[in-house]
Image: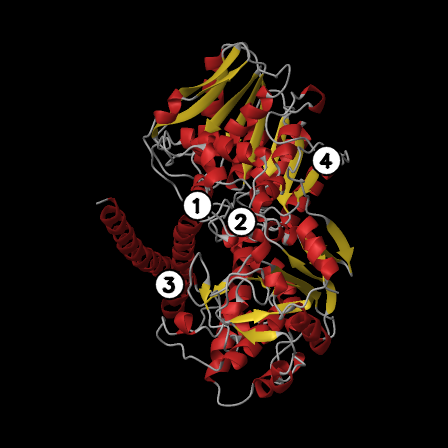
Amino acid sequence: MQEASDLWDFLRRGCWGLLAALGRVSLTSLLGALLGAVLGAGLRLLGAPVTFGGSLLVTPLLGALLGASVGAFRCLRYYAGVLEALMLYHPRKSRDVSFMDMSWQLGDVEYSIQMVSYTLPNVGPQVSYLLRPSGRVETLWAFFGGNAMLAVDWLTFFDKVLTHMGEHQKPRTTVAFLLVDYPGYGRNAGEPSPERVLESSKLALEAAVQQLHSEVQVQLLGHSLGAAAAAQLAADWPSAPGLLVLSAPFIDIPHMAVQLLSVVLSKGLPHLYGLVVDALPFQVQTLEKYLPSSRWMASVGQRLKPWIVLLLWPVVPHLWDNSKSVGKAAKAGWQIHVLHGAQDDLIPSHMGQTLANLSQKEAQKVREDAFSEIPRAGHNDVVLKGFEKYIKLMGLTDVRGRKPSLGLPEDGAEEENGPRKMRIRESSHEGKFERRWADWVACGVRTAGALTVLTSHGYAPDLRDLLSILQSLSLSPSPTITSAKKVFERLGYRHTSLDINGRDGAQVVDLSRPLNVSLLSSCDVVTNFGTTEHVGEGEYINALAGFELLDLWSSQYQAFRNIHQLLRGDGLIIHMVPAAGCWPRHGAVEYEPQFFQALAGAAGYEILNLSLHRPSYYWSPAEERFFWDLLHELLARESLTLPESIVPEMVSIMPHLEQAKQANVLAVFRRGPGSRGPSSRDWAVAEERFQRLPGLHWKATAALGPCLLSSKLQVSRACEEAMAETGSCSMR
């Protein structure tokens, strides 16, 4: 019923807008013609020497043309407003108040949620929410969310904030938080606009201060659209200025419109180009000779951007001009901090840098913390990825006062056979940042520590992740996250998954065939975590209509060629596949380490690592405790419980494959910088040569014996001992 109502409302507004547009043009044209006729008659009556060849005829036409132009501009502005409202505002209605029962105990002080009610003139009742301590309040932080956020969406962040505050010996419990909903959002009446949001924000803040019954220092924090709401409130707030934290802010809406246009073109043109190329009867090289270079097109685009912004300025109704608000707030004395995700594809970080520079210029004061870029953070996860930075700016962190951790051992203090915490390291390589392969494959090398490694990198598992791990215990005590794509994206990486089955957000692609040209040279890192051994496997291809079963060796050749061509520049290729003789009845082919040694020589790769690894399925006591504590915590948030039969002791009795019988080949390559284009000549390995590479075998049904003793691997005695002792052995 709600969807039908929304559709009817959209159609009604669209029809009314069309009629209104026609009416505006007709009315302004008629008024222009009448004024032109009056002017022409006056000129004739006065005997004006210039009559344009007959004032009574020409001036009404000119007036009608002018009037039609004014009407057309009004129509253009109206429809620009409709388009802006559709793209900029995504209000959600919610009358759920169950969260009002939430509370947090910090020593003798209890934090609870109160409703703040007020009325917006000519609009109607409005509601925001006050998260306050039971004691006195000295500081009030007002939070403003993004264009699709409700005030209650901040509670996940504040649960983490209050948990963090509770870990201090003397937590700062004189801080309250106001969570603001815009007009039209949550329980609020009306529709959002800069003017209404400003008026509503002032009323919400005044009502909250009055409800606290004390003099408080007001601080503001806004994310995305909320940064614009916070900035304009700071510029117009009459009381003493405080801190203004802007999270992922944009400059203004015209600049954002140009940014979105560039994103659409950058993503749409390659796909269009690929469709055109696929339909052409001649070779790609023939077309490329007549096309302008991408560098030339990018240069033209950069030059046109300021002019497009200038043309959009009078057309866009809701400007949300942050440059004006930030400048005014800085002059008023607000201390402005800008935080931005380094991998924000929606609002690029240079916009945040621009506003930070403007604030320092207007304040005539240079600060090192005016702008902070959060590594590996995008637009929607920057607050959680940069959590420590946010709470530090808010004055809620004090490392010296932290209580001892009750979870995993601190860095440098491992339990016996416990996990070693790992960090993603970054190193400069020819002006680019390269993720070290050791951390990319950490979860594949040591399966039992995968959850620990991911959380140490900043990944926050959700309930579905933990339940999938629990389900995997029926096969082996090995933490298996539901989707690698979800993990990479939550860690801030732009991730594309290619698979013939199309599962877990993957694009449906047959890797045994050449890739669409739009995918070529598009990746900095390509991972093959147990994929290529299935390329050419009959049960996978025959299960889907439209895919033909090709010769297995040709399929393997094309799969490794595709991996090469997905990469751009001197990026990384990471293979983690079953070793020959291991993992029986799994996949269509199996690989010896010497295959990857030969492949690197044929393709010109630099070998960063080539080794055998034994999967580890055993959890340490610390890992077990970490998993079960986290699972029960997330279940409690959803008011769920596990059946009594599912207990931590089940881990030690679950069946699993014997470790000594299994092994994987790890091969990490860096592609040489010589080949960057998308044409087939960049792959220097002919198919005949590929098929002669040693170490690539049909998958044969084998007994479940230790694969390290298989004649296909032919490992040395020293390698066997190293595998038994450390779980890995270098094959270089």
Whether residue 329 is visible here, answered yes or no, is yes
Q: Position of residue 159 (x, y in %)?
A: 50, 27
Depth check: give the residue in front, 169 or 11.
169
Q: Disc 2 residue type? A: Val
Closer to the eye: label 2 or 3: 2
Closer to the eye: label 3 or 1: 1
Depth check: give the residue in front, 496 or 659.
659
Q: Disc 1 residue type? A: Ser
User: Considering only vertical position in the picture, is 506 above or below 165?
Assistant: below
In the structure shown, which secondary structural element does the residue marked by tag 4 occupy?
loop
Whether tag 2 and tag 3 are in contact, CB under 8 A, the answer is no
Q: Name the residue under label 2.
A: 487
- Disc ID at residue 468: 1
In the structure shown, which secondary structural element does the residue marked by tag 2 occupy?
helix
Q: Say whether residue 450 is left or right of residue 602.
A: left
Whether tag 2 and tag 4 are in contact, CB under 8 A, the answer is no
Q: Name the residue under label 4.
A: 369
How busy is the neighbourhood of tag 4: few (under 14 within 10 Å), some, or many (20 plus)?
Answer: few
Tell me which label, 2 or 4, sits earlier in the chain: 4
